[in-house]
Amino acid sequence: VKTDLVQERALETVIRTVGTVDYDERRIRQINLRISGWITHLFVDYTGKPVKKGDPLFTIYSPDLISTQEEYLLARKTLDRVKASPVVHVRTGAEAQVESARNRLLLWNLTEEPIAELERRERPQVETTIFSPIEGVVTKKTALQGMYVTPEMNLYEIADLSVVWIQGDIYEYEVTWVKIG
């Protein structure tokens, strides 16, 4: 028999369980396009490959994108020719055409940098590079070189693994013992 003084203290219970590590759903991005075209080159060519934000994923050849680039360049040339026009409607019409083509390029997820490069080169870029929007690991890849892609296709899924979730399985009677921290 062992005796001891009565003390007030917190009771601790150890719960042993199993759990699975999972991606934080708020840190997953699916990569798809807003245009159709053919994948001409894959830079990220396997599942599990780590990527940094801004890394090239693949290049695409899109006739729609090329024609919009040509339309933008033509609208800029037209605007340059009619800038000095005394007719206001001609100038504003040309400015509206430039703005419309530029907005279409932006809506197709081209950033300011490729548009500035297009203005500098003054000729359309045949292949456009698509870059990673986040840093993480490729968890799903359906993109293949030479594949025809459309806007509804998910080409990559990239998960940021800086924060992960652990899904633990505990019995119902143990729930009262589980607390944050």
Image (spheres, grey):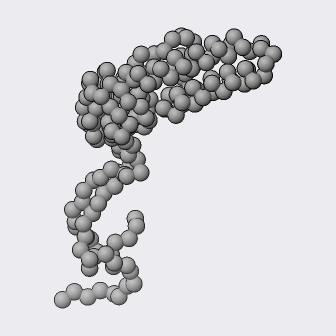
- Please tell me which residue is depicted at 41% across the width and 27% down the height of the picture: 130
Front one among 60 and 35: 35
Answer above or below: position of 148 versus 74. below
Residue 155 on image: x %, y %: 32, 36
- Please tell me which residue is depicted at 21% across the width and 62% down the height of the picture: 18
Residue 93 on image: x %, y %: 69, 24
Q: Is residue 114 left or right of residue 92?
A: left
Answer above or below: position of 72 versus 137. above
Q: Can residue 43 be seen in this view?
A: no
Q: In which quarter of the image is residue 147?
A: top left
Front one among 86 and 42: 86
Q: Is residue 93 left or right of residue 158?
A: right
Q: Is residue 35 left or right of residue 139?
A: right
- Please tell me which residue is depicted at 38% across the width and 80% down the height of the picture: 9
The quadrant of the rendering that contains the N terminus is: bottom left
- Please tell me which residue is depicted at 67% across the width and 21% down the height of the picture: 94
Answer above or below: position of 171 versus 17. below
Front one among 39 and 96: 96
Q: Is residue 85 left or right of residue 62?
A: right
The quadrant of the rendering that contains the C terminus is: bottom left
Q: Quadrant of residue 101?
A: top right
Extreme residue toward the right, this view: 86
